[in-house]
Amino acid sequence: MKTRYSFGGDEHIFVEVDEEMSLDAFFKSLSMTNAVRDADISGVTEICPANASLQVKFDPDQIKPDDLLAELKTLETAAESAEKQIATRIIEIPVYYQDPWTHETLMRFRERHQDPEATDLDFAARVNGMASAEEFIAAHHGSPWFVSMVGFVSGLPFLYQLVDRERQLEVPKYLRPRTDTPKLTVGHGGCFGCIYSVRGAGGYQMFGITPMPIYDPTQTVSYLSDFMVFFKPGDIVKWKPIGRDEHDQIEQDVETGKFAPLIRNVTFNLADFNNDIDGTNKSLTETLYGS
Amino acid sequence: MALKIIQPGLLTTIQDLGRPGYFHLGIPIGGAMDRMALRTANLLVGNDEGAAGLEAVFMGPEIEFTADAVVAVTGADIPVLIDGEEQAGWTGLPVKAGQRLSFGFLSEGARAYIAVSGGIDTPPMLGSRSTYAIGALGGIDGRAIQAGDELPIGPSDANKAGASMPVELRRGLGSPTELRVMPGLYWHRITEKAQKSFFDDEWKVAPEADRMGYRFRGGNPLEFVERKQPFGAGSDPSNIVDGCYPYGSIQVPGGTEPIVLHRDAVSGGGYFMIGTVISADMDLIGQLQPHKPVSFVEVDMPTSLQARADRAALMGRIRNHLA
């Protein structure tokens, strides 16, 4: 890992912690983000953490770009020694895989896909050396995922699966992005999963849909009444496969204010995870389901 | 006091100076694409510079006033009509209750800004009235205005009728346009030849140009320096591990058509960026029409900061003129 700094015009500094994705790179960018936030540097207006990088927006009328750059490099040294551990939460997210809405959409945009004859799930299964979409779906919800970035549009989470690199699901993005994606589509591009928070353009493969809203500007959804965005970096997600009936029931319960996502507080320690991946995931899941 | 929308125009949205502070959640700053034009329009009617006004793209709306007010139109060159009579642009115009504001055909520029004394008083969301349509935030239900809408206007005791901005203080909408760029970010991903052609080539604004970003075409495709793609980046040479996008950053999916992200930018994604349009030139992009020839000009940090200072000085002269 070699940190690289670059100015994004006269108002941004881009800090690439690593070219490639890893939880080590994520934790270092998170530590740096926290260090920059805690330093409360006058002239810094926004700090955006990403998967393996971060971006600091600043007002050059208040702080000289080179001064800020020097300060960030100092903070990097301190961030390197920070413990790679966070107090966070694990959340169960219901997913209706192979739903009719993403299916209708993927059929509409077939000419933009690598494999126009297959569905996105069939394609994803094949490029990951699996025999069937069902096998891929089992791997998809088999282990929890980590929210490594929130962004693109309104509260969209990028998710990185908590498995070793050999088991990471990797799927190319569409050849040309779609102009439409159903709201709450569960997607995947490169090594990242995502949930499309709003309807709109997108290039990730589409696997299913969740009935659980994650962004609500009207703040009428009960669990979004305090803040309109559900996710924050460091959240852990456990997908729960559901069928049509359960999907429709949850959708109705959200509408009537009866649905509350299953959430438990957990501590995630990267060293513990790296020592025993399956054991850590088992204990995360046990915390979630209280067994 | 309200504005009754008779015709909305092509795409007219309520905008102020935006909502900083939520980009880390994918909610962009938004606000007027041509900030100086909105600030000037507000000053011409006696508002705070950051009051909410209307941003009209390519075509003006038709609006009826329910009470006396002062209105000013800045930005694009477009004939301003009150009850069908042509009026001066960049000027505080008195209007009476029941009168109608409408527009002729736009000649230069892309976005007209309409400020009304008192400012548009729709409810702020996350600290701003700016319309962010993708996230259904701000404006009226997060959307562009429609015929039949009534936009509430705040109180005002200013009387700026007759104030006007001299031509030398209106930023020109020249052609061809030069956009100054600081190379950086993933600039090293393209070959020296591609780095040179990017700045040498003439580009044209593509039809896909909106508040999120402006796409350009017509230049040579950019060749990549060969590498093994890093884990998690995706297989195309233009892919990176999804990261944050600066406002003004230039991404080039597949190496073919540069996209400059603007006020409603997506906050991040998986395409590499070759540099960033400097802050002083962002307003200018909002006034570019499709098919406009554009060239990108390489600048360094000192030049960017000087351009920023020059622009702040111009804004200072505008304020002084109306003080």
Image (cartoon, rainbow, N blue to C red):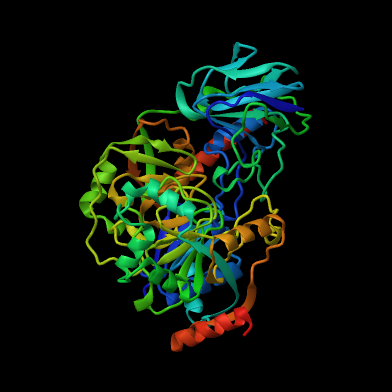
Horizontal side of residue B121 vs A83, given as left or right: right
Residue B206 placement (x, y as % from top left): 36, 36
Residue B62 placement (x, y as % from top left): 61, 21
Nearest the camera: B244 or B192? B244
Horizontal side of residue B137 vs A12, given as left or right: right
Label count reads 0
Whether residue A171 appears in this view of the structure is no
Nearest the camera: B11 or B200? B11
Residue at point 55%, 85% (across, down): A283
Assign the C terminus of chain A to one quadrant of the image.
bottom right
Nearest the camera: A85 or A242? A242
Position of B12 relative to A46 (above/below) = above
Whether residue B87 appears in this view of the structure is yes
Residue B122 placement (x, y as % from top left): 71, 38
Nearest the camera: B201 or B143? B143
For residue B69, what is the image quadrant?
top right
Assign the N terminus of chain A to one quadrant of the image.
bottom left
The residue most toward the front is A245
Residue at point 52%, 45% (across, down): B264
Residue B8 placement (x, y as % from top left): 59, 26
